[in-house]
Amino acid sequence: MTDMELLKHLMLLLFSAQVITGGFVTLTSPGQYAVLGTEVSFTCTVVNASVGGLILISRNDSQSFQTVCRVEASSGGQISGTEEFICSAVAGQTSTYSLTIRNVSRNDSTVWTCQAGGMTSNRVTLDVQYPPTVEIHTVTPCSGFTFLVSESNVALNCSVKGANPAPASFTWYHEDATLQNGPSPIYTINSVNRSTGGQYRCTADNGISPPGEDDVTVYVHYPPTVHVGDTKRVVTESEDLTLQCTADAIPEVTSVVWTKKVVGRRISENGTLRLRDIHKDDAGIYVCKATNKVTSCSEGPQTKHSHASVTLEVQYSPTVEIHAVTPCSGFTFRINESNVALNCSVKGANPAPTSFSWYHKDVSLQDGPSPIYTISRVTRSSGGWYRCTADNGIHPPGEHGVQVDVHYTADDLYAKPQTKEKRNLNVLVTGKKGCPLAPEKLFRKKLNEQPLSHLWRHSAEAFEAEKRQMRTARVSIPPEPLDTFSVACPHSRLEPDRTLPGEDLEEAQQCAAELSQAYHPSLAYMNRLIHSMHRRCNGAATLLYGPHGGPLKLHALHSLRGMAVTRYQ
């Protein structure tokens, strides 16, 4: 049947429909509600009347009724409808017609009526129930699902977009682990941490299966966590060291930079710091800074920095310097001074030295923890090269040396502490002209009209033999009135009036040098004495010494007739 033929047929049935007074039409449904997607049927019954024409079943769409299915009253056949709506006469029942909705939709949840023979039935409301449709949203002020570590009270809302009836229960899951179940659609994350990230799912249940469900992925951003390994490194000077800095971050770091604290300038850009031939000035705190860009749910994108530091300790051998201990201010000491101290002062060392060694002319003096070496009494032999070493276990030990000079006068050298009855003087025995007395002239002098040689315990021959063996000869004189004396640097071949040539002066100076080794007098003093004698006299110097190298006593010299006495204080 074509559409035109159908239209003509409907018009014919419509105009032929009978209206019976006293009759009525009823519309019934099987229950109070229908579940979305199920099948439901309405029954339209004409009571107390016999009608012809069409039976119309309509639903209210947007404030007006629209016919969804038509049945020919006489034949009970469906005149119009769709696969969704099927209508027909109910077999075995007079004037009873049915409408079957094969797949109930939410649009079917409305008011329905039936018309027959110009009569309209009662209105029946069909309640179509369906499960919730939900969608997860973040709660203000958050605007997305990216959170920052340590943010607090971040909330997710299982928002219901549609449901009939309304959901009575909501269940939250995180990675399939149940978090919360109850009437509230809100789940609150009290404090965001790294484990907060992942898939979140909520279900909403209103008794209509299946429950409404939605899921989202939550991302957690966090600033870099910087790893530098051991936070303290100990190396020995001149060694190499590599410091490695890594960072754990989401999103990944954009830069990893090493700097040295205080200095502040960048010394490495890639997380690896290589220190070559380390010097003690390289010691200090090295800081690694990592940077990334994170997103906060409430504040949006922002840049974050994190730091970690390494303290570098450089161990190195000591640097020492010898100082004289107060009240001394230099390294020139006076003979017979007591408790003169030298300090092996540490100018720099790491670790501190535990042992100090002192040497004098490469002879070990002292080893131990004290840096102080004390000269209890300064003697002529105290002078010379002093060296100290400081050992802290780092090779080589620190070392420093100084030259110590000992100053003294002739009195300091030869005068011995004696009683008042034996006071000594430095003396020079000269002839009548004030010039040194040559040894052979001294032999011919007489004491109490006796040759001097007769008073010596050694004969003149023995003395002469001894002179040939030694540059300095010592002879004994009777103890009273003379004491033991020595003749130093005799030049027997020179006459008193003879001019002293240059080579003889050189010989006299050499003799003085040899004397300085034997008696340790001041070489400068001896040279001054030789030059003085050379200016005054044409002879060699003859010096007389008393017991133990001390000067001859004055009263003993007075016993030598014809001699003048010159004092050298």
Image: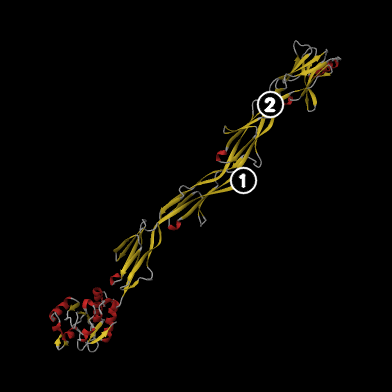
Q: Amino acid at mark 2?
A: Tyr
The CA distance from mark 1 to mark 2 is 41 Å
Q: Secondary structure at mark 2?
A: strand
State which quadrant residue 2 falls in: top right
Does 204 sit above or below residue 472? Answer: above
The numbered disc on residue 130 is: 2
The numbered disc on residue 471 is: none
- 495 horizontally vs 91: left or right: left
Cβ atoms at labels 1 and 2 below 8 Å apart: no
- 297 horizontally vs 5: left or right: left
Q: Position of residue 288 (x, y in %)?
A: 51, 50
Does 158 sit above or below residue 480? Answer: above
Q: Which is more toward the observer, 234 or 259?
A: 234
Q: Which is more toward the observer, 224 or 350?
A: 350
Residue at image point 18% right, 76% down: 470
State which quadrant residue 43 falls in: top right
Residue at image point 31% right, 76% down: 408
Q: How many marks?
A: 2
Q: Which mark is first along the chain, 2 or 1?
A: 2
Residue sitting at the far front: 420
- 548 horizontally vs 234: left or right: left
Q: Badge 1: how crowded within 10 Å, few (<14), some, or many (20+)?
A: few
The numbered disc on residue 301 is: 1
Residue at image point 24% right, 89% down: 433
- 508 horizontally vs 397: left or right: left
Residue sitting at the far right: 21
Quarter that holds the C terminus? bottom left
Residue sitting at the far top: 92
Q: Badge 2: how crowded within 10 Å, few (<14), some, or many (20+)?
A: many
Q: Position of residue 79 (x, y in %)?
A: 78, 17
Q: Position of residue 161 (x, y in %)?
A: 69, 32
